[in-house]
Image (tube, rainbow, N blue to C red):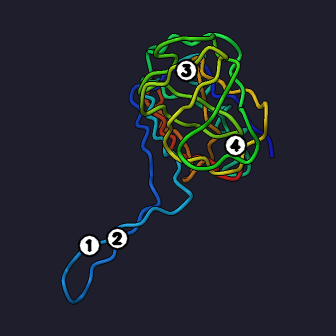
Amino acid sequence: MTTYAFPAVTPSKSTLELVSNTRSFVSPLTNAIQTTNRKGSYWKISMEFKNLTGADRATMQAFIASLNGMEHRFSVQDHSFTSMRGAGGGTLLVNGAGQTGSTLNADGATASTTNYLRPGDYISFNNELHMVTTDASSNGSGEVSIVIAPPIRKPTNDNDVIDYSIPVSGIFILTSPAGWDNRPGGFSTLNIEGIEDVLA
């Protein structure tokens, strides 16, 4: 299995969706509703490429062929993301092995930085893509506590690098066969759907 970088071709339309693994239970006696969250939330991405021609058309066709259906993986960013909101800075590292849950402890940030990361910023580590959900500021030692979604899926390794620059990408797998249609003049339309590989 190989992980391919997504080509530098911007989709006409893209959708990134966080699929939560939640369940609800309704009491047959009182109709009270209880909800529970289970591990295994993941990102789902859909991309549409309209009227591709020339090099972009050939590049995307070759990329799809190289994936060979569900055999290989690909790394891709949220194409709608424009810029990081937080100040960033430094080399951000996981601070402590075995972390789980919705808060990641990190160090290596620029010290004493207010709004080091802001809601809507992305980070990736441990082959997982996460979104920052609250403001995170670093202390005088460069330590920062980051609240994220979805929760951490695999226990962390100490000192793993956390990528917070753009583009930040996740590891995805195709969920349906990807192909393209062809029209006179050498135009093609192409659709790609994938889900984050939670075991990557």
Upstream in sequence: badge 1 or badge 4: 1
Sequence-wise, the earlier of marks 2 and 1 is 2
Marks 2/3: CA–CA distance:
40 Å
Disc 3 crowd, CA 10 A, few/some/many (<14, 14-19, 20+): some
Question: Could you tell me the amino acid type at mark 3?
Answer: Val
- Give the spatial CA distance, label 3 vs label 1: 45 Å
Along the viewing direction, whichever of 98 and 53 lies nearer the viewer: 98
Frontmost residue, 44 versus 145: 145
Residue at mark 4: 73
Q: Is residue 83 left or right of residue 109?
A: left
* Residue at mark 1: 33
Verify CB contact (< 8 Å) between mark 2 and mark 1. Answer: yes
Mark 2 vs mark 1, CA separation in Å: 7 Å
Nearest the eye: 107 or 21: 107
Dot 2 lies on which element?
strand
Q: Amino acid at mark 2?
A: Ser
Q: Give the alpha-carbon distance from disc 2 to disc 4, as whole Å.
A: 32 Å
Q: CA distance from mark 4 to mark 3?
A: 17 Å
Task: Look at discs 3 and 1 and give the one toward the viewer.
Answer: 1
